[in-house]
Image (tube, rainbow, N blue to C red):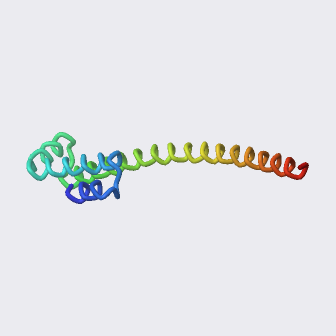
């Protein structure tokens, strides 16, 4: 968790992306303070201790992948919109430049 805080402080990691990492740090901290909780979850699920840890890790990684997929989708949409706006502005600029040169040629 200290590394995540340092990355946020130095602006190498945005706060919105750090929430999952901080959440995972809190979960690991809770399981390290109360290891019997993991035993209880293992008994409830009917699995071994290691299998439960693997399932929790897999669910965490699945959550991260889902989060980054939504972020990538949003960025892709914004990129498309910016490209379209840039193309329109470029077209308008070329038209204005052409009109300007036509006007200069007439003078």
As drawn, the residue found furthest toward the top would be: 44
| For residue 76, side relative to residue 65 (left or right) | right
State the residue in front, 47 or 7.
7
Q: Image point 25% across, 58% down: which residue?
A: 6
Q: Position of residue 106 (x, y in %)?
A: 91, 49
Rendered view: 72 above or below 12:
above
| For residue 65, side relative to residue 77 (left or right) | left
Q: Image point 21% across, 42% down: which residue?
A: 45
State the residue in front, 28 or 74.
74
Q: Image point 30% across, 58% down: which residue?
A: 10
Count of marks overlaid on the render:
0
State the residue in front, 40 or 103.
103
Position of the N terminus by quadrant: bottom left
| For residue 82, side relative to residue 101 (left or right) | left
As drawn, the residue found furthest toward the front would be: 107
Q: Position of residue 32 (x, y in %)?
A: 12, 53
Q: Position of residue 91 (x, y in %)?
A: 75, 46
Q: Image point 18% across, 51% down: which residue?
A: 28
């Amino acid at each position: 968790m200290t590394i995540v805080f340092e990355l946020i402080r130095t602006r190498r990691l945005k706060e919105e992306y750090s929430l999952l990492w901080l959440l995972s740090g809190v979960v690991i901290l809770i399981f390290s303070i109360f290891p019997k909780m993991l035993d209880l979850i293992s008994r409830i699920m009917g699995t071994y201790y290691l299998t439960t840890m693997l399932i929790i890790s897999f669910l965490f990684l699945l959550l991260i992948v889902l989060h980054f997929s939504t972020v990538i989708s949003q960025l892709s949409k914004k990129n498309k919109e910016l490209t379209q706006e840039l193309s329109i502005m470029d077209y308008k600029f070329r038209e204005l430049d052409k009109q300007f040169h036509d006007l200069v040629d007439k003078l």
